[in-house]
Amino acid sequence: MTVYGEPISKLPNVGTSIFTTMSQLSSDHGALNLSQGFPDFDADKRLVDLVNHHMKSGRNQYAPSNGIPKLRKEIADLFSDYYGAQINWENNVTITVGATEAIYASLAGLISPGDEVIIFDPSYDSYDPVVRLNGGIPVRLKLRPADFSVDWDQVESRIGANTRIILINSPHNPTGAILEKTDLERLQEIAIKNDLIVVSDEVYHHIIFDGQRHESVLRYPELAMRSVAIFSFGKIFHATGWKVGFAIASETLTREIQKIHQFLTFSVHTPTQFALADYMEEGLQFESISKLFEKKRDLFVDQLDNPRFIPVRSRGTYFQLLKYQDALNDMALATKMTKEARLASIPISVFYEDGFDDHVLRFCFAKEDETIMKAVNILNAYS
C-alpha cells in the first residue's frame, strides 16, 4: 500500500548502526560494554569546571559560525608547532559538531555528482553513506588482511577520470593500524599526479604507541595544500559526549567546508569552546595521552591468556583486535559472547562492503584498569 507523501529512502540499505545494536544488546544482558568507543572515566575536572565557569559567565549565545577566535588560534598555534605546518587560524580552521560533522561538511562541500571517493575497508561506518548522500560513488578497497596496510599499487590502478577524493584514517578505526612515512609520501605522489583531494580522519592522532610518530597529512606541505585533516576534542579530552571537533585545510578547501557547515549546524556549543581554549592555553602534551593508553593496551594484551584469541597488537587508537578460531562468524560470536559471557565487542565484518569475515572482534580498552581486567578474565575463561 502506498501512503501519500511516503518518502523514497536515500539510504535504503542503511539500518541501525552496529554501535547502537551492540550497546543495546550489552545493556539488555547486563554485559561489560567494550563495543562502543568511549571511556568509562571522566574528563579532567579542571576542564569541566571551565565549561561551568563560562556558562555562569553568560557565554550562552551563538558562537561565530566557524568557531570562537581564541580556540581557533590555540589550534593553529599548537598544530603548527606539533606538525611543522603553517596554519592560519582565520583561513584554515573550522570548529564543528564533532569529527562526524567535519567529515560530512568536508565531503558534502567537495563532492560533485558522479565523483568517486576511494575508501579503505574495513572502514568507519559513516564514510560510505555520506559519500552517497552527496551524489558521490564510494570505491571500497580492502586493506591487506594480515596487517591492515594499504596496497598503493592497487590504489593507483583504481584511479580513473572520475576519482576525486581519497579518504584515509590513521590511526585506524577499527583496526588500530597506522600509516607510516612511506605511506604518506606515496599518497602525496598519487594525489599530486592525479590532482586529488585527501580527506584525512585523524581523530586518534594523539593515541599512538611504541615510539611511533603520527604521520599527519599536515607534515607534508604539498599534501597538506590538497587535504582536509579532521580531529576530535572528544577523543583528546575523554569527553565524547561534548561533540566538538575541527577541520584544518587550505583556504580554498576551508571555504567550501564552511559553506556547508553554516547551514548544517551553524555553530558549536559556545561555553565549551571557551573552556577548551582556556584549557589548551594552559598547555597540552599529546605524548602523555599516548602513554596512558599504551599502558592500557599492554594490560589488555599481556594479561590475555587464551589460545583461542590471537591479538593483532594495536599500534594506535584505543581499540584492540582479537582474531579467533571458531566455526561461528564474527557477528554470531559477538552476539553469543554478549549474551552468555556478558562481554560486548564489535564484529569487524560489518565494516566491509562485502561483509568479509576474517573472524576478528574489536574491543575498546579506553577503560579503567579494573574494567579491562574484568574483560580479560572473561576472555581467558571463554571456551
Image: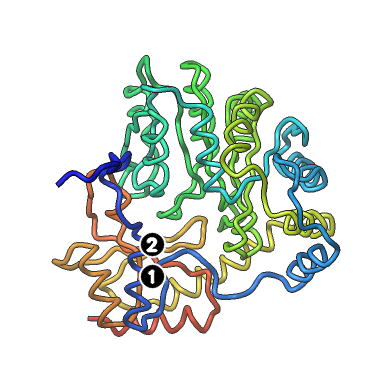
Q: x and y percent of residue 280 in the render?
A: 79, 56
Give the crowd class for mark 1: few <14, some 14-19, many >=20 residues within 10 Å.
many
Q: x and y percent of residue 341 in the render?
A: 29, 82
Query: Image check: 93 left or right of 7?
Result: right
In this rendered view, identify the residue nearer to me: 301 or 101: 101
Give the crowd class for mark 2: few <14, some 14-19, many >=20 residues within 10 Å.
some
SS class, disc 2: helix
Which quarter of the figure has residue 272?
bottom right
Residue at x 58%, y 57% (from the top left corner) = 207
As shown in the figure, which amino acid type bears the numbered disc 2? Answer: Phe
In this rendered view, identify the residue nearer to me: 150 or 337: 337
Quarter that holds the C terminus: bottom left
Residue at x 37%, y 23% (from the top left corner) = 156
Which quarter of the figure has residue 206?
bottom right
Q: Say which residue label 2 marks.
A: 19
Q: x and y percent of residue 184 in the render?
A: 53, 33
SS class, disc 1: helix
Q: x and y percent of residue 145 in the render?
A: 30, 48
Q: Are marks 2 and 1 in contact (CB under 8 Å)?
A: yes
As shown in the figure, which amino acid type bears the numbered disc 1? Answer: Ser
Specify whether residue 99 is in view. yes
Query: Image check: 211 left or right of 276?
Result: left
Q: Is residue 135 above or below residue 350?
A: above
Specify whether residue 182 is in view. no
Which quarter of the figure has residue 381?
bottom left
In this rendered view, identify the residue nearer to me: 273 or 65: 65
Residue 46 got which mark? none
Q: Say which residue label 1 marks.
A: 23
Residue at x 74%, y 58% (from the top left corner) = 285
Query: Image check: 147 left or right of 357?
Result: right
Residue at the outermost front position: 4
Residue at x 45%, y 67% (from the top left corner) = 364
